[in-house]
Amino acid sequence: MAAGAILSGASIPILSQTFLVWQILLSIIFLGRRYKANQLFGCFLVTVGVIITVASGSGAGNSLMEAGIFWSLLMIVSFLFQAADTVLKEIIFLDAAQQLKGGSVDLFVVNSYGSAFQALFICLLLPLSSKLWGIPFSQLPSYLKDGAACFLNIGGTLSSGCDGAPLLPMLFVIVNIGFNISLLHLLKKSSAVVSSLASTFSVPISVYVFTLPLPYLGVASSLPPGFVAGAIILVVGLLIYTWTPSDSTNFLPSSSN
């Protein structure tokens, strides 16, 4: 979060593509996966497609230079932990299928434990996070109070940045929960890498949505010059990744009998 506050919006999706690289490396190390050349090439094309879609005309390269190497590296390292989270969940589902003799762990149990520990460590790391944000720890309670007031849209003294609250924040929470559960279900049925590739497809969709005249978005942005080319490359990468012989099962978890 600290790096995300410093880096530009265009540079974050580019750096987030290291998430897929971390997933592939961790699945090879801990799951013993072996990826075929077409799968690795498909992942590469997906990454290139996202970078072209987001970075074309955005000056993302200059933004990365302005932010400094430290924050870029911090963002890249943070995606290592997110990738480890998805691979660990995949290990849990695979182990549960063996231990429960064909049974499975409930998605909401896995998601609830993950969210609970995420909230716990966010609270424990608040002193460090506040220092990275440049907020004195003694002033943190007032920031949290103002944040809660903005979320609920109460007080009347906050800036216009709280427009649409509490409806928009609640809609974000609901949609985010549904999105995460859908990805977790896909991870359970396939693999962490497949779920990551599927979520990557949302990048060009979200870029296009922000060009529509929707409420609370203000002036709609224009499509980046490389949007169509990047989206095509991304889709081609997904198709190449899924193009495997029917008898190949080394990259997907096999079903237990």
Image (tube, rainbow, N blue to C red):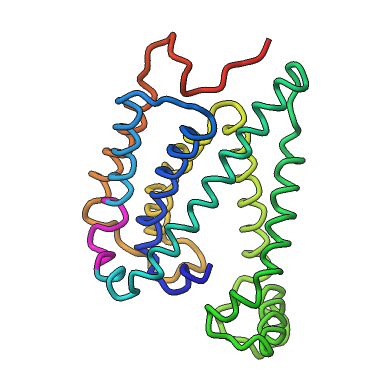
Q: Is residue 168 left or right of residue 124?
A: left
* Position of the C terminus by quadrant: top right
Q: Is residue 109 left or right of residue 198?
A: right
Q: Please tell me which residue lies in front, 243 or 168.
A: 243
Q: Position of residue 57 (x, y in %)?
A: 23, 62
Q: From which residue to which does the magenta span run? A: 52-61
Q: Please tell me which residue lies in front, 98 or 214.
A: 98
- How many marks can you see? 0
Figure check: 18 above or below 189: below
Residue 22 drawn in magenta = no
Q: Position of residue 255 (x, y in %)?
A: 62, 16
Figure check: 224 above or below 185: below
Residue at 66 percent across and 83 percent down: it is: 143
Q: Position of residue 95 (x, y in %)?
A: 68, 27
Q: Which residue occupies the extreme front position in the image?
A: 29
Residue at 46 percent across and 32 percent down: it is: 28
Figure check: 71 above or below 36: below
Characterize the magenta stretch by its predominant secondary structure.
helix
Q: Position of residue 179 (x, y in %)?
A: 59, 45
Q: Please tell me which residue lies in front, 18 or 112.
A: 18
Figure check: 11 above or below 228: below
Q: Please tell me which residue lies in front, 14 or 93.
A: 93
Residue at 30 percent across and 42 percent down: it is: 231
Residue 39: image quadrant is top left
Residue at 69 percent across and 49 percent down: it is: 114
